[in-house]
Image: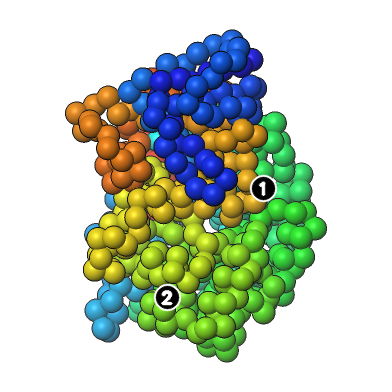
Amino acid sequence: MITEIRNGTVIAWNGTEHFVIDPGVVVFSGNEITFVGANFDGYSDSIIDATGRIVMPGLINCHLHVTDTPFTQGYLEDIGDKGPAGSATNLVSLYKVLPEVRHATDPNAQVAAAECAFAELARTGSTTVVELGYDYEIGGNGDISATERVAEVAGRLGLRCYSGPRYRTRHYGQNSDGSIFYKDYPNKGRSRFDVCAEFCEQWNGRFDDRLRTMLAPGQVDTCDAELLKETRRIGDSLKIPIQLHAGQSPNEFRRVGKTEERTTVEYLEECGLLGPDFIIGHGQIMSGDGDMYSMASHEVAVLRDSETTICHLPWVKARRGGVINSIQKYKDLGIRQSLGTDTFPFDLFNDMRMAAVVCKIVEHAADAAPSEDVFAMATTGGANALGRADLGRLAPGCRADIVLVRVDTPKAAPVYDPFKFLVLSANGEDVDRVIVDGTTIVKDGTLQTLDVPAAVHRLNEASKRVWKRLDL
């Protein structure tokens, strides 16, 4: 089946960068784009009229957690958390609230949360998502069935999903006096690692290859060197990407320095993790003061030359009173970058805008983090991190993951620069149609693959029992 999308403002790819064709045409056959240009004289079986629409590649949301995020709303916001110098420490949310919420959930609640989270992701234009699942003790001492059920939901809803169940050597939490504790799992969590690795091998490529897997060791301060080295070995064997939480808090950076006697980047290098298939989720505190220019020259060189990707989560950081210092610095240093939402809302348009604006504030420069760069982070940046030259681009040979965004509205008109509109003005509610692998899963702003009101009802019911168990 050959489908032609015509009369829209097309964000095309020329092999190096995105550019605008207005009006433009995108043609796809099955799940593959076959033509992108100004005029198409060939045959098509069906036509989508994109008048009043921007036609863009699907967004790639490189870091998120669908099974607990809906239950954290109302518990993570507006919580004071300052260090001696008045800087944000991220202690309360990261070491107390999140573990408590996750322990209060159950598998059925996690699936109900995943349904609504994936629905929001699809509805707001994320066609490829990276779901990072629970750790050992929350996963039932190694039970992978919840991860399998969540992966089934993503496949059923039609998304392109990378599933990465997490594992680690030890867990952490906050004591009543505010101090942080770390406690090793039995056998240092190796049983959980084995189960996660088996899942990654068995589930990779399901749902017509829309579901792929990823190795996801937990936070850098919870993983010993042996576990990280084994992660690299298995990742190379299975040829799948790896993502690890790092650079989340000053406490984490100090902890790695104390236990490993080296910086976070040096530790990751020693364990062999750095590479074009490796993603550092968060990447905010990669130096003692959180300034990217404070990294040592050898750290900058190894991040740059290994083609490791930093996945930024700007909204969740700004909400905690912190900033990434900065996206512009990472770019100037030649380090690859992508974007994710991490938690609520799952609208990557929100994080594009936050990335651009927060960076301008940090750098005291209106021309920092230009819209074209931020849009690239949300598309080709994520695709490159996943090793997918066939995603995040509208070009012949790429997957037919396409999003139509309305610009026939008072808010949008007139559209002088599509990139600036998409990054600085648009949001997920402007998304009109979403096509994944050649199949329309959102039409006229409505998800076609899920009874959304019923899913919302299931989540609301699940929240009652989860919140009842919370001990904060």
Question: Is 283 placed left or right of 383 in the picture?
Answer: left
Residue 151 drawn at (x, y percent): 61, 39
Residue 347 drawn at (x, y percent): 38, 42
Which residue shows up at 65% across the image and 22% down it?
30
Q: Amino acid at mark 1?
A: Thr
Corner quadrant of residue 70: top left
Which residue shows up at 72% across the image and 43% down it?
204
Neighbour tally class for label 1: few under 14, some 14-19, many 20 plus, Cα within 10 Å: many
Numbered tag placed on residue 38 in the rendering: none
Contact between labelled residues 1 and 2, with CB atoms less than 8 Å apart: no
Question: Is 284 placed left or right of 402 in the picture?
Answer: left
Q: Which residue is mark 2?
A: 292
Neighbour tally class for label 2: few under 14, some 14-19, many 20 plus, Cα within 10 Å: many
Q: Amino acid at mark 2?
A: Met
Residue 265 drawn at (x, y percent): 56, 77
Residue 120 drawn at (x, y percent): 41, 36
Q: Earlier in the sequence, mark 2 or mark 1?
A: 1
The reply to whether residue 90 is visible in this rendering is no
Q: Using the numbered discs, state the Cα–Cα distance from disc 2 to disc 1 in whole angstroms.
A: 30 Å
Q: Which residue is mark 1?
A: 213
